[in-house]
Image: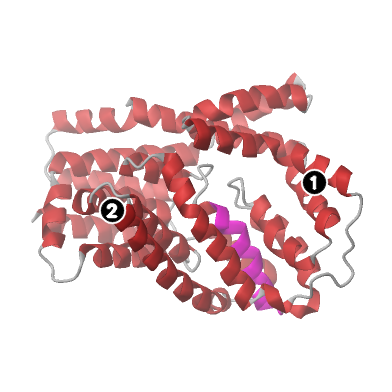
Amino acid sequence: MDLIFLLLLFAVLVVLMVRRLPLFIALGVTVVLGFLVYRVPLQNIFEILKAGIISRTTLLLILSFYAITFLQRMMEKRDHLKLAEESLTNLFGSRRINAMVAPFIIGLLPAVGAVLMARPIVDQAAADDLNAEERCFVTSFYRHISESFLPTYPSIILAIELSGVPLPRFVLAMLPLVLLLFILGFIFYIRKIPKTAGFKATNRRKSWQNLIISLWGIVSAIILILAFQWPVYLALAPILVLSIFVNRFSWKELRPMFISAFEWKLVLTLLSIMVFKELLVFTGVVDSLAAFFGSIALPPIVIFGLLFFFGTILTGAQAMIAMMLPVAVTTLGQNLGVLVFIMSMTFIASQVSPSHICLGVITESYGLPFTSLVKKTVTVMLSFILLSALYSYVLSVVF
């Protein structure tokens, strides 16, 4: 019955997400329903809420999200992402590099509107050598590559916390797949763009200086996380303080950032996820589901790969990570290769998911149906699934 109840909760979550309800509302309703169907006593409900909402882990995650958003506000205020894009043009004079790297740089920080910032850059770089559907794909695809591995994204931070895999190991393990994503996009689309054709590299010294000025904050934070294994909030703390002086922020500029950096929808989503995780632990359904998958003829890793892929298409990455990652870890173990495989499936599925708001924004901007973006993504998606599965298998054997 526990497994039947979990399927019921999953079905409710899918229906609510398909009806375009915000994730924190969909998860909140699912949690309440979970309390009812599992008949959780009132006293235990309060214990679950306390463990999910005010635990040290939850509070530090909120602090990490807040620090990331604050850095994003500071970079936006100084137009650093735009400066980085201009520096790339002056450095390399390559339409291909602009079409690939500029959207990637814009995607270093999580913001829905970033995909619209990337569009004119791609349009100018690709010109008539790519049609509208291809430019739409390139804009969306390269802008989102950073979501596959960077700890500036909530889904990555949550996955690390729920899996127990050290963040530096995960990020380093994902780098070959990041390169693979760049290569696949190049093979199928970017190579159609001439190398230069009107783009001329100019003033390289000044351009390198501007590139460093625009990206030093986020690059420094990533280095601190990887080299010293600092948590995200701790790595960003000195960066934020130093940025105030380096970029000469006044109190008048900083004051509204303290409020705007607190994105309440993201916080509510996090709280819903953590409470749902505690509910699954309390009911013991995680262990029951792990035993169930172990009894099926198909390899458990294949089952979870399918679950995360199709589940992400239906509900989005964060919902699937919240609901199924604890089950996957219990079933398959705390394995680096397993996490890389699951997050690879989640990432690539999110590139064709109707619940991914950025995809709706960019297709609407180009005046294209959503299916046109899916059509252009399919070949890249299938290639990535095959190659990332092989890579993840090697990781799981070696590590």
Of the residues shown, which amino acid type is indicated by label 1?
Answer: Leu
Give residue 366's position: percent from left, percent from top: 68, 71
Q: Left or right of 74: which side holds 390?
A: left
**Which residue sits at x=53%, y=64%?**
180
Say which residue label 1 marks. 83
Q: State the SS at label 2.
A: helix
Quadrant assignment, res 61:
top left
Q: Left or right of 98: which side holds 282?
A: left
**Which residue sits at x=57%, y=38%?**
222
Q: Left or right of 377: which side holds 336?
A: left
Q: How many other residues sit within 10 Å of disc 1, few (<14), some (14-19) or many (≥20)?
A: some
Give residue 217's position: percent from left, percent from top: 66, 34
Q: Earlier in the sequence, mark 1 or mark 2?
A: 1
Closer to the camera in the image, 385 or 120: 385
Q: Is residue 91 above or below residue 281?
A: below
Say which residue label 2 marks. 324
- What is the span of residues highlighted in magenta in the rendered image? 131-146
**Which residue sits at x=47%, y=44%?**
154
